[in-house]
């Protein structure tokens, strides 16, 4: 499975990317009926990956440690999150 759609843990993500983002969930409403898996809670901060999606044509927010099945895996639209921190890893 490619990293674009992978359900990565925090430790796996830090092995594949030089930067880690934290994002605040600003919109947890309107969960799609066909979404199977974890769903964020509004008002919480999550470690995330920002991944450009070739299929959607926009960057998606992947919450690290979340498990989700097709078609969304653990990806959410950027309108649902606000990035609050960026940590560069050495």
Image (cartoon, grey):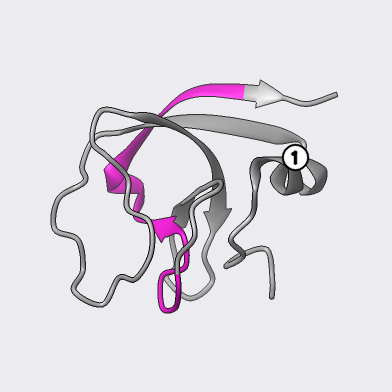
Task: Name the image quarter holding residue 72.
Answer: bottom left
**Residue reaching furthest left?**
30
Task: Name the image quarter holding residue 88.
Answer: top right
Q: Which residue is mark 1?
A: 14
Is residue 74 magenta-colored? yes
Above or below: residue 14 compared with residue 76: above
Which quadrant would the N terminus be assigned to in this image? bottom right
Q: Residue at x 25, y 28 (%)?
A: 43
Q: Residue at x 49, y 52 (%)?
A: 66
Q: Residue at x 41, y 78 (%)?
A: 71
- Measuring from the top left, give residue 77's x and y in whole percent: 34, 55
Task: Tell me the crowding category of disc 1: few under 14, some 14 to 19, or many 20 or more residues within 10 angstroms, Cα based.
Answer: some
Q: Count every numbered label the image shows and give the total.
A: 1
Q: Is 14 on the left-hand or right-hand side of 72?
A: right
Which quadrant would the C terminus be assigned to in this image? top right
Is residue 54 magenta-colored? no
Above or below: residue 60 compared with residue 5: above
Above or below: residue 12 compared with residue 85: below
Q: Residue at x 55, y 58 (%)?
A: 52
- Measuring from the top left, give residue 45's x and y in whole percent: 40, 28
- Pick the residue in front: 14 or 37: 37
Above or below: residue 10 compared with residue 73: above
**Residue reaching furthest right?**
90
- Pick the residue in front: 56 or 65: 65
- Measuring from the top left, give residue 51's x and y in whole percent: 56, 54
Give, as a single range, the part of the protein colored magenta.
69-86
Where disc 1 sits, the SS reads helix
Q: Is 67 on the left-hand or right-hand side of 24?
A: right
Task: Name the image quarter holding residue 36.
Answer: bottom left
- Measuring from the top left, give residue 86's x and y in whole percent: 58, 24
- Pick the residue in front: 53 or 2: 2
């Amino acid at each position: 499975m490619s990293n674009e759609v992978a359900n990565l843990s925090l430790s796996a993500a830090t092995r594949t990317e030089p930067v880690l983002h934290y994002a605040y969930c600003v919109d947890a409403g309107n969960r799609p009926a066909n979404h199977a898996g974890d769903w964020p809670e509004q008002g919480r901060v999550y470690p995330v990956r920002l991944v450009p999606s070739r299929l959607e044509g926009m960057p998606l927010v992947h919450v690290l440690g979340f498990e989700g099945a097709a078609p969304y895996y653990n990806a959410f639209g950027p309108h649902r999150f606000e990035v609050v921190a960026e940590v560069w890893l050495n």
